[in-house]
Image (spheres, rainbow, N blue to C red):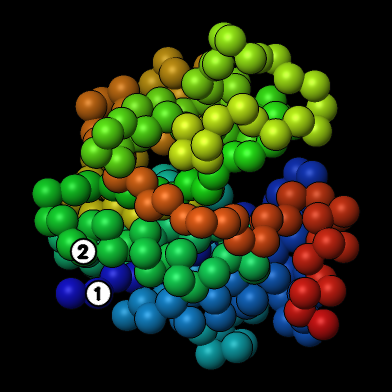
Amino acid sequence: MSFCVLIPARLASTRLPRKVLLDVGGVPMIEQVRRRALESGAARVVVAADHPEVVDCIRSYGGEALLTAAEHVCGTERLAEAARLLHLPDNAVIVNLQGDEPGMTPALLCATAQLLLDHPQRQMATAAVPIIHWDELADPHAVKLVLDAEGYARYFSRAPIPWDRSHFPLSSGQVLPQTPGIWWRHLGLYAYRNAFLQDYAAWPASPLESIESLEQMRALERGVRIAVYCAAEAPVAGVDTAADLDRVRPLFS
């Protein structure tokens, strides 16, 4: 059994307009992302776009792309529509790779999918990396998660969790006081079974999802257990701003 990668791509990004079509290493960013997905060993890679220009771009490189509705509020909902348009079976394992992650490692894609491929009862998986320094733990843009003893996510938050009341808060630059393995940063990479993905898209946004502005909370609040692949180190961070683009481009020159 294998998996497919679906890549949600939105042209009208707010902080960096048209970023998925900006040049990274001589090709549009979204094409670089598609190439990382192909290197993962996925059986199928499809870009799910909100604009015909993105679809035409991918097809010009020989890739597979389809047009989805413009009004989706998150990438997961866009992928649910794409999976329906592709007539994927209910048990298909779908990896959600964001369209602004050209530095994602193919091995991480494969490992996250494997959490579902090896365990038929699981419906959703994601990935995380250790947090070592206080600045990252305190950063609200870095999403933290707490794991249970079986490697499932208990909670996600933009707040520094878990809170070490004997030592926190620390000053800027300080290393966290305990052995790595307590604090984890969530990576915006998901795998789902298609039947679950369709259920998720039909559910209304949940209270904690709205408060934290984290779409995975919708699943946790419904009692879904999210398996977590714990990687040793983070891939190159995604592109949200012009500064991020300047940081990423030299890696592909």
Which residue is at 43% across, 77% downward? 40
Q: Is mark 1 on a helix, strand or loop?
A: loop
* Image: 9 above or below 43: above
Question: Which of the pair 23/3 is nearer the observer?
Answer: 3
Q: Which of marks 1 and 2 is nearer the N terminus?
A: 1
Which residue is depicted at the point 32% across and 80% down?
Answer: 43
**In the depicted view, which residue is nearer to us: 150 or 48?**
150
Label 2 Cα crowd, 10 Å radius (few <14 / some 14-19 / many 20+)? some
Residue shown at 53%/90% (left/top)?
Answer: 62
Residue 229 screen position, x and y as percent: 38, 52
Q: Name the residue under label 1.
A: 2
The spot of residue 219 in percent (x, y) is: 32, 32
For this rendering, which residue is in front, 9 or 143? 143
Which image quadrant for residue 19? bottom right
Location of residue 125 with respect to 33 vertically, above or below: above
Distance between the Cα atoms at labels 1 and 2?
7 Å
Amino acid at circle 1: Ser
In the displayed structure image, the side of residue 16 where residue 169 appears, left or right: left
The circle drawn on residue 91 is none
Q: Are marks 1 and 2 in contact (CB under 8 Å)?
A: yes
